[in-house]
Amino acid sequence: MNFALILFVALVVTGAIWLFDHLFLAKGRGAEAKLPVLVDYSKSFFPVILIVFLLRSFLVEPFKIPSGSMLPTLLIGDFILVNKYEYGIRLPVINKKVIALGDPQRGDVMVFRFPSDPSLDYIKRVVGVPGDVVEYVDKRLVINGQPVSYVADGKYEYTGQGLNFIRADTWREKLGNHEHVAMVQADMPPVIVHQVEGNFPHRDNCQYNDSGFRCTVPEGHYFMLGDNRDASNDSRYWGFVPDENIVGRAFFIWWNFDDFLNMLKSFTPPTRIGSSIP
C-alpha cells in the first residue's frame, strides 16, 4: 500500500473541495447558513492531512519492524522513526531527489524500497557505499581489503520461523562510526549460493563460492546486510540498492508493546522504548 499516495490524494481532494466552496459556493450562502457536510469535513481534515503529509514526506516517517532480519539490533514489533531528510530532500510520491544533503554511510541502518518490488519497504544496514569492494568470507566482513573489527559478545537466543529455537553467536562489529551487534548461526553457510538471483542489475560485479562472496558496489548504489546474518534476505541474494530507492535512516525506537508490558509488570524502566538505533 502506497500510503504517501493515499495521503496525497486525500490532500488534493479535501483541498479542492474547500477551495471550490470558498471561491464559488460560499458567496451564495448566508452568513449563518450551515456548511454542507462534505465541505465541513474537508475544511476540518485538510489542515491535519497537510501537516501529516509534510511531516511524513520531509522530516520523519514511522515504521514497524516485521521480521527478525535485524536481530538483535531491532526486534519484531519495534516501532521506529526514520529520518527523511538526512540523505536529501525528495519529492513525495515520485521520490525524486531535488536537494542533496548527504549520503548513506557505512554502518547506517537504512530503510529503502525493495529493488525487485518498490511497493515493499526493507530495512538493513549499509555495509558498502559506491566504489567499495565488499567481501564476506567465512562470515567475516572485509571492506576494501580491510577486515572489519569485531569482538566476541556471547550468545543470543530467540524463536525463529516454525517455532524453531535458535542459539546464535554474537559479536560487536564497527562499521564507520557505528558499533553494533551482529550474529550468525554456526551451522549455516555465509551465503546459500543456489538462492542468489541470477539476473539482478550489476550481477557481474559479484563473485560467489561456498566460503562467501566478493562484490564491487557500483556508482549510485549501496550494499546492504541484515545484522542477523544467517536469517536475512539482503544484497548478497538480490543485489544493490539504487539511490532512488532510499527512504531514509532509521534512528529511534519509539514504541514496543512487549517492552511496555514488561515495564508495567516489573515496574522497571523500558529497555527499548526511547532508545536510539546503533
Image (cartoon, rainbow, N blue to C red):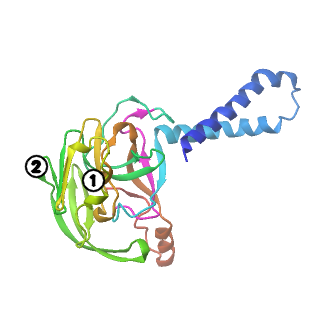
Residue 178 image position (x, y, % from top left): 25, 53
Which SS class for mark 2?
loop
Label 1 sits on residue: 236
Binning the other alpha carbons within 10 Å of mark 1 as few (below 14), some (14 to 19) or many (20 upward) gives many
In depth, the one of 54 and 244 nearer the eye is: 244
Residue 216 visible, this orientation: no
Label 2 sits on residue: 145
Q: Is residue 83 magenta?
A: yes
Q: Is residue 248 magenta?
A: no
Q: Residue at x 26, y 50 (%)?
A: 107
Tell me which corner region of the image, top left, top right, bottom left or bottom right, holds residue 169: bottom left
Q: Between marks 2 and 1, how big is the CA–CA gap? A: 18 Å
Dominant secondary structure (helix, strand or loop) of the stretch shown in magenta: loop
Tell me which corner region of the image, top left, top right, bottom left or bottom right, holds residue 278: bottom left
Left or right: residue 171 versus residue 74 is left
Highlighted range, magenta: 73-90
Looking at numbered disc 2 in the image, what kind of residue is underneath it?
Answer: Gly
Can you tell which of label 2 and label 1 is closer to the viewer?
1
The tag earlier along the polypeptide, 2 or 1, is 2
Left or right: residue 41 versus residue 69 is right
In depth, the one of 85 and 3 nearer the eye is: 3
Looking at numbered disc 1 in the image, what kind of residue is underneath it?
Answer: Arg
Left or right: residue 111 versus residue 19 is left
Tell me which corner region of the image, top left, top right, bottom left or bottom right, holds residue 99: top left
